[in-house]
Amino acid sequence: MALPSPSTSQGAKPRRLRREPSEGWLAVLLLAPAALLLCGVLLFPMLTTLRDSLFVNKLTEPGLGTPFVGFKQYVQMFGDARFGQALRNTLFFGVLTVAGSFLVGIPMALAAHTPSRVRGLARVALLLPWAMPPVITGLIFAWLFNGQYGVFNDLLVRAHIIQEPLRWLSTPGLAVAAMVVTIVWKTSSFVALIVLGGLQGIPRELTEAADVDGATRVQSFFRIILPMLAPSLAVAFIFRSISAVQVFDIPYTFIQQAPAQGLLETLGVYIYRTSIEFLDFGYAATLSVALFAVSLAVTAVYVRFVRGGD
Amino acid sequence: MEDTPPRLSPLERVGRWLGLTALILGGFFPFLWMVLTSIKTEGELQKFPVQYLPGTLNFANYAQVFTEQPFARFFFNSLTVSLLSTVLAIVVAAPAAYALSRLNIRGRGVLLTVVVAFSMFPVVSLLVPLFRLMRGASLLNSYPALILPYAALSLPVAILTLVAFFSSIPRDLEAAAMVDGSSRLGALTRVVLPLSAPGVVTAALLVFVNSWNEFLLALSFNTRLSMRTVSVGVTLYQGEFAFPWPLIAAAVVIATVPIVILIAVFQKRFVAGLTAGGVKA
């Protein structure tokens, strides 16, 4: 405290003032609990997965022991048709649902951004799908898509689009469509919220100036608003891609109701089954590493392009 | 200014009205449909064309939710786990966020990137190692089995939200308190913490919702009926081939009510947290 401070700066530059000798220790002390929790519960288990993927460990066959097999289980994985199918499903659902969540989410954000008397209600409508437990979303939509008494069938019949109720969940192609709709409903909110944040950061003078210059609203959307939203869209895209790769809850609930399991099984579901249902911990660890690698690749893209400025 | 929209053409008015209607209807309909389903009888449900409104208000399904499964217990478990993981996450995140936004730390940018990277960890990939860890520590079928991973998984988002809020508090205020003779700790408790209360509330809400909604770890770690949480509990009413929808709907409504209340009350905090945290992260 007694030290004279050379510059009582308030700028954004790192402050050099009051460099008490204890500050480094203070930082370590304040960061330690977070580091401990993150490393103990996330990082350390992930490292043990790497190790586990090199050992056989089947609880159903305790006689095998837990021998070291090197990369044998990785070789097994690349020859595993079910893994291939799960990976393809994951990427297929990922592409469709990420694209869908942007197509729905951006108009949602625009609607919620316009001032109106029902703004509060619109905001809750925007938050509800995001905050809804995913497993409950899966259950709700399984009921909405019910093959006999589902409300979607009812609406389509009333609108004369179909004659007879469709068996959504027991027809493979339709089950895939139903799951895409469900995931898009659940995830569009997130995109909309991030985009809304971006919209709130665009100064109104900018669009007003365009108005004065005679630009139509469509022109000013594509020429001014959309380019200014680019950072928000990039962030939303990365986070949506990550969660799409890891999707579990909604496919899991749908599989309980739909016989078309092969088409709905994502990588996440396959890992769950391999570990908790088939009790093959070694192979599950190998599959987990594969999923982790895919997530890591997307994270690397994020670090490179979004945080590149740091 | 906010509430005087620019003059709109009739076409734009209609478009805006349609957009808002679609947003509100689309957001609420699935949940409202569950509410309607939950007060219908099995007979009323098994009709096509669908009977939209129930003939009478029938709350028997709600009673049955609690008699068929120990749902009150599930609810209590979820509440305990979610509240405790929220407290743990905030208590751990707040000092870290303060350090990251206020102290001279070399490699601050790298540390923030590491925090973001942790938020992208695939939970499914942690299933086996965490399961073994919990089994090794005899923690399966216990509250800590969920509290520890929930707090850790939500820690990044809590830290990033708090960093954004701490950074928005003018440094001068804190500096002034320190010039007046407060220690850094004094300035923290008397100036920074009161001002960052909205940030703490926002971070806490995000952690609570994440924990309340979590399904995979709850499904795998706490398999004893008395230790189940509501997200798993709602899936226990269906049989292999039987789906008693009015009953499932009632359970779904009860499980979702806390979330609906939270977002209705704290809508501004949620929107602020998600819009700010996401982009600044």
Image: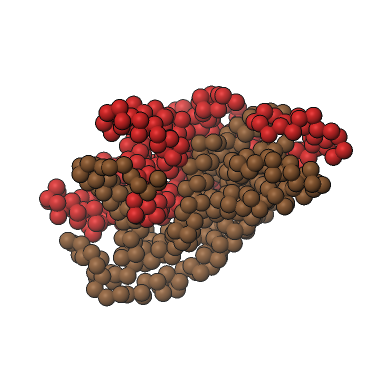
Chain colours: A red, B brown
Residue A11 location, quadrant: top right
Asked whether A287 or A131 is in front, the reply is: A131
Question: From where the camera sits, is residue A44 visible?
Answer: no
Residue ID at (70%, 49%)? B191
- Measuring from the top left, give residue A186's x and y in whole percent: 39, 47
Residue ID at (19%, 54%)? A155
- Measuring from the top left, give residue B64's x and y in whole percent: 40, 73
Question: From where the camera sits, is residue B59 visible?
Answer: yes
Asked whether A309 or A184 is in front, the reply is: A309
**Above-or-below relation of A82 to A133:** above
How many labels were placed on the picture? 0
Q: Quadrant of the C terminus of chain A?
A: top right
Find the residue positioned furthest to the right. Answer: A2
Judged left or right of residue A249, residue B112 is: right
Residue B67 location, quadrant: bottom left
Judged left or right of residue A90, residue B105 is: right
Residue ID at (31%, 65%)? B37
**Above-or-below relation of B261 to A221:** below
- Measuring from the top left, give residue B92's x and y in whole percent: 68, 48
Residue ID at (34%, 55%)? A118
- Measuring from the top left, give residue A296's x and y in whole percent: 54, 30
Q: Quadrant of the N terminus of chain A?
A: top right
